[in-house]
Image (tube, helix red, strand yellow):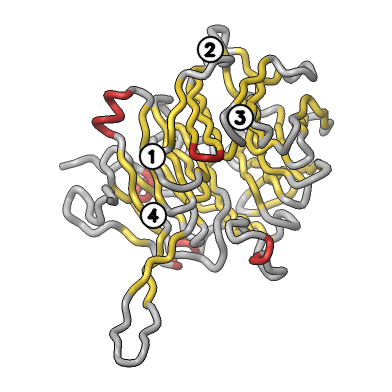
Amino acid sequence: MSLYRTTGSTGTTTAMATDKDLVNDITINNPANDSISDIAFSPQQDFLFSVASWDNTVRIWDVQNGMTQGRAQYEHQAPVLTTRWSSDGTKIASGGCDNVVKIYDVASGQTQQIGSHDAPVKLLRFVQCGPSNQECIVTGSWDKTIKYWDMRQSQPISTVAMPERVYAMDSRQKLLVIGTAERHIIIVDLNNPGQIFRTSMSPLKWQTRTIACYIEGNGFAIGSIEGRCAIQYVDEQEQRKSGFSFKCHRQQQQATATTGTRASTESHVYPVNSIVFHPQYGTFATAGGDGSFHFWDKNQRHRLKGFPPMNSSIPVCNFNRNGSVFAYALSYDWHQGHMANRSDYPNVIRLHATTDDEVKEKKKR
């Protein structure tokens, strides 16, 4: 059952956007030559971001006075699945189907391979580990491991076995959460990064697609292929009190009526491809295979604003460092396999300037 209200706490109808709300979005045409797999903003600059793509390339884009320009790019030997920036904004890390982890130095333009897995690298994050808060990179792979890397050496600091292939991963504060095949959810306390804190099963019935940690580091949201999202907390008592799940990224469509019968509606279910939390307000966005994105408030269990579906799936989205810009990709998300990938499918990134009305929590009166 969906626990998200269709009306706000004041009794007003949840705001639904129209196409007019998107006309001022900045469009980056052809930011990649194949499907876009990841978008990551610099933590030091508002309009500088990297894009990972299935065309084996990581590109760095900059937006100045409403104009976009490519700053740099570097290559992998196979599709790139993930990219992130170091906390000081000087380095970009990436991993992909060539099984390697690369570091790009923004100032010098030099690329270095720092590690590898035995299978594709699905995700990576820069994290601060242990009491000293040493910054390192954690990578999750289809080889059923996560590995921690010191950027100065080629051997991993630590390797931790996972119960299955890594499909989703995120980190905030000292919390690291991994979602694997067969719906396993693994929680790691980064004060003790080499040990698993807790393993459980996803409360959602179908494959995990994405995970995002709360900015407070006390919980996480899970998105699945069945168009559902689960709100989870690390503390079991808080989970019993505040945890829940809800339906999203589903479209009601009129079913074709047979002769002499009344037409009925049917629900088309799409995967939740990406979940990201606003870096200041703690609200969050979801984006899905139906080509729409929505802003939500988990504390009030309320949708802040929903946007109309576009003529393309949205494989990934992200906020910039202060949440003033919301980037989303219009690109094939592979949820229907190779046969559904058309030659005319768009590869576009749009930058949406957020307003407080869209992303700020609305207090109860």
Mark earlier in primary sequence (2, 4): 2
What amino acid is labelled 3 in the image? Arg
**Res. 125 mark:** 3
- How far, Cα to Cα, is label 2 from label 4? 35 Å
Q: Indicate the quadrant where residue 193 lies.
A: top right
- How far, Cα to Cα, is label 3 from label 4? 26 Å
- How far, Cα to Cα, is label 1 from label 3? 24 Å
What residue is shown with label 1?
Answer: 203
What residue is shown with label 4?
Answer: 248
Mark earlier in primary sequence (2, 1): 2
What amino acid is labelled 4 in the image? Cys
Of discs 2 and 1, which sits in the foreground? 1
Using residue 123 as the reference point, say whether residue 317 is left or right of it: left
Mark earlier in primary sequence (3, 2): 3
Image point 65% across, 48% down: which residue? 37
Tag 3 secondary structure = strand
Farthest residue to the top: give it.
Answer: 131
Q: 263 or 23, which is in the foreground?
A: 263
Tag 1 secondary structure = loop
Of discs 1 and 3, which sits in the foreground? 1
Image point 52% across, 45% down: which residue? 209
Mark earlier in primary sequence (4, 1): 1
The answer to the question of whether label 1 and label 3 lie on touching residues, with beta carbons closer than 8 A, is: no
What amino acid is labelled 2 in the image? Asn
What amino acid is labelled 1 in the image? Pro
Of discs 4 and 1, which sits in the foreground? 1
Residue 256 at what x, y percent from top left?
40, 82
Mark earlier in primary sequence (1, 3): 3
What residue is shown with label 2?
Answer: 192
Image point 27% across, 33% down: which residue? 242
Rate crowding at label 4 as few (under 14), some (14 to 19) or many (20 or more) other CA atoms within 10 Å: many
The answer to the question of whether label 2 and label 4 lie on touching residues, with beta carbons closer than 8 A, is: no
